[in-house]
């Protein structure tokens, strides 16, 4: 694997779940980090432990606003563009902002990279495959997305962002990369962010029913945060444009996940079946051949271990009600 090191990185969305782990990892590797975040769905708590480090700075700004990133001082040799609400509950609450950050925000982050001749990486998503008709999903699958459904604010904004990144590469020669992340989980997810893992863990710890959507037969391929961070940084270092899938290969149904979390927490919670969200994808599993071949990446933390660590973190930081 390429061992490229960075001098100064800008991480948009760095106060969020994935972003805060990236800030931490890059600082530990000796990179100066500037985190730009408007705290729409992230939290200063996620980066509080980094704020005393003189090599870390935090800028509270909306990256979709004109000139938001123009004030970020150079030089910068890496731009990781994560800013974007990522949980369905969050992006359905912030639909226009989600589209703006995929469009204007991505443009601003690309301009920052272009001005500095920096490496640029967009965290795209398995959602660009929509409700996939091909299984597992390879990077050359174009997807099956409803362009006007409620989820389209996220899916199409990421698809637009990918197109813009590709256009900057073709037009300006910007050194870009696209990573498509699959359902990542771990410490620092908000207990109320609405995604399945934090919801089920919080419900189990609080003795509430676990809200399984539909019959719970839909599948996801969960990825532990440390593996996701490894994959993102490996692609950044490799210099390849992508897109590259980064995701776990153990496909699990949502019902299996809920039952597993009940067992893991020793909870007395029951399962409650609730309405399935509109356009909720029926199955999702990455083909990770490219990540293996190109980056030498494959997931190292299995679900049993990753969920155990996550439950321990939730129990420690958000004790049961
Ligand atoms: P998150 O909501 O925890 O983090 C997103 C961060 O972006 C937050 O700190 C939020 O405040 C910030 N943000 C949002 N809009 C902004 C704006 N206009 N200006 C500045 N900051 C803004 O979500 P996450 O799970 O950490 O996701 C991070 C990235 O990874 C997102 O781009 C998401 O689409 C992508 N992704 C995540 C997953 C996953 O499973 N976690 C899967 C696929 C893709
Ligand atoms: N889900 C669920 N109960 C919840 C939250 C989510 O059954 O309390 C389901 C959701 O309908 C989807 C799956 O779990 O089928 C994963 O949802 P999540 O929001 O974690 O991620 P995404 O839909 O973006 O893959």
Image: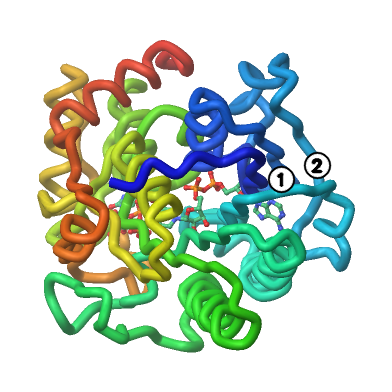
Residue at 69%, 17% (x, y): give it: 53
Of residue 199 and residue 160, the one placed in the foreground of this image is 160
- How far across and down, in percent of the image, does residue 22 sit? 50, 37
Residue ID for mark 2: 60
Of residue 253 and residue 44, the one placed in the foreground of this image is 44
The number of callouts visible is: 2
Secondary structure beneath label 2? strand
- In space, the residues marked 1 and 2 are separated at their CA atoms by 5 Å
Residue 213 position by quadrant: bottom left
Indicate which disc, 1 or 2, sits on the residue closer to the N terminus: 1
- How far across and down, in percent of the image, does residue 287 sit? 16, 66
Secondary structure beneath label 1? strand
Answer yes or no: is residue 123 visible.
Answer: yes
In-image side of 3 versus 79 (left or right)? left
Q: Is mark 1 within 8 Å of ligand 1?
A: yes
Residue at 80%, 42% (x, y): give it: 60
Q: What color scheme is it? A: rainbow
Residue ID for mark 1: 37
Of residue 218 and residue 164, the one placed in the foreground of this image is 164
Decide: few, some or many residues near mark 2? Use Cα within 10 Å; few <14, some 14-19, many ≥20. few
- How far across and down, in percent of the image, does residue 179 sit? 40, 62
In-image side of 198 versus 83 (left or right)? left
Residue at 36%, 70% (x, y): give it: 243
Residue at 47%, 18% (x, y): give it: 318
- How far across and down, in percent of the image, does residue 201 sit? 32, 30
Reply above or below: 136 against 81: below
In contact (CB < 8 Å): disc 1 and disc 2: yes
């Amino acid at each position: 694997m390429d061992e490229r090191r960075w001098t100064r990185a800008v991480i948009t969305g760095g106060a969020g779940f994935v972003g805060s782990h990236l800030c931490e990892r890059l600082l530990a590797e000796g990179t100066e980090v500037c985190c730009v975040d408007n705290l729409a769905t992230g939290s200063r708590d996620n980066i509080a432990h980094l704020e005393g480090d003189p090599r870390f700075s935090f800028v509270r700004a909306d990256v979709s606003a004109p000139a938001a990133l123009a004030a970020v001082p150079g030089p910068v040799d890496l731009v990781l563009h994560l800013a974007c609400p990522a949980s369905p509950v969050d992006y359905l609450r912030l639909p226009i902002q989600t589209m703006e950050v995929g469009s204007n925000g991505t443009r601003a982050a690309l301009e920052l990279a272009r001005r500095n001749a920096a490496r640029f990486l967009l965290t795209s998503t398995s959602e660009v495959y929509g409700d996939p008709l091909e299984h597992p999903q390879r990077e050359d699958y174009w997807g099956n997305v409803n362009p006007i459904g409620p989820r389209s604010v996220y899916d199409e904004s990421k698809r637009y962002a990918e197109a813009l990144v590709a256009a900057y590469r073709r037009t300006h020669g910007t050194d870009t990369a696209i990573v498509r992340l699959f359902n990542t989980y771990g410490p620092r997810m908000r207990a109320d962010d609405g995604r399945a893992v934090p919801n089920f863990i919080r419900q189990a710890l609080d003795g509430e029913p676990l809200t399984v959507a539909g019959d719970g037969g839909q599948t996801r391929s969960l990825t532990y945060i440390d593996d996701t961070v490894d994959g993102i940084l490996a692609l950044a270092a490799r210099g390849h444009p992508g897109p590259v899938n980064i995701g776990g290969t153990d496909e699990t149904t949502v019902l299996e996940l809920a039952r597993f979390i009940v067992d893991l927490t020793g909870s007395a919670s029951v399962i409650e079946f609730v309405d399935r969200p509109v356009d909720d994808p029926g199955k999702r599993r990455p083909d990770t051949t490219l990540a293996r071949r190109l980056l030498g990446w494959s997931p190292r933390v299995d679900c049993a271990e990753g969920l155990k660590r996550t439950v321990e973190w939730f129990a420690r930081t958000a004790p049961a009600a």
